[in-house]
Image (cartoon, helix red, strand yellow):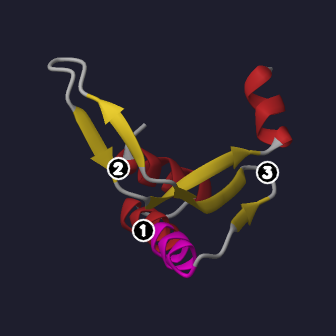
Amino acid sequence: MNKAELSENVALELKVSNVEGKKAVEAFIKCLSKALKKGEDVRLSEFGTFQVVKRAPRTLRNPQNGLLIKVPAKKTVKLNISPILKAKIAK
């Protein structure tokens, strides 16, 4: 499912227009992004927890030519799925 399909499904679920569904999805993404940028965790009880984690710098080997590549430290987002969602998927 892509963003447009998600927006349509949200609109159907809320019984609003596709434009309103798109606005709802974009508002969610905007709020999520702002919170993560501040370093906050975002916990959605039936979905999961979004967290910003730091990845340490590391050295990798290019498999094509064997040269070492240095990858700098960076921040990334991690999603821990909730047990509720795991149970829903397993059904």
Instruction: Name the residue at 65% across, 75% down.
Output: 40
* Of callouts 2 and 3, the N-terminal one: 2
For label 1, the crowd category at 10 Å Cα-Cα, with few meaning under 14, some 14 to 19 and many 20 or more, is: some
Instruction: Name the residue at 24% across, 26% down.
Output: 62
| Disc 1 target residue | 26
The magenta stretch spans residue 47: no
Quarter of the image that includes the N terminus = top left
Q: Nearer the viewer, residue 55 or 45?
A: 55
* Of callouts 1 and 2, the N-terminal one: 2
Instruction: Name the residue at 55% across, 82% down.
Output: 38
The quarter of the displayed image where residue 35 is located: bottom right
Give how far across and how far down residue 31 sits, in percent: 53, 76
Q: Nearer the viewer, residue 36 or 68?
A: 68
Name the kind of residue labelled 3 in the image: Glu
Q: Main secondary structure of the magenta part?
A: helix
Give how far across and how far down residue 27 sits, in percent: 48, 74
Name the kind of residue labelled 2 in the image: Ala
Task: Name the element at disc 1.
Answer: helix
In the picture provided, is 5 more to the left or to the right than 12?
left
Q: Nearer the viewer, residue 14 or 67?
A: 67
Give how far across and how far down residue 74 sits, in percent: 43, 60
**Distance between the alpha carbons at the discs numbered 2 and 3:** 23 Å
In the picture provided, is 89 more to the left or to the right than 14?
right
**Distance between the alpha carbons at the discs numbered 3 and 1:** 20 Å
Is the residue 54 above or below the residue 39 in the image? Answer: above
| Disc 2 target residue | 4
Query: Start and end of the magenta stretch?
Result: 29-38
Q: Nearer the viewer, residue 35 or 44?
A: 35
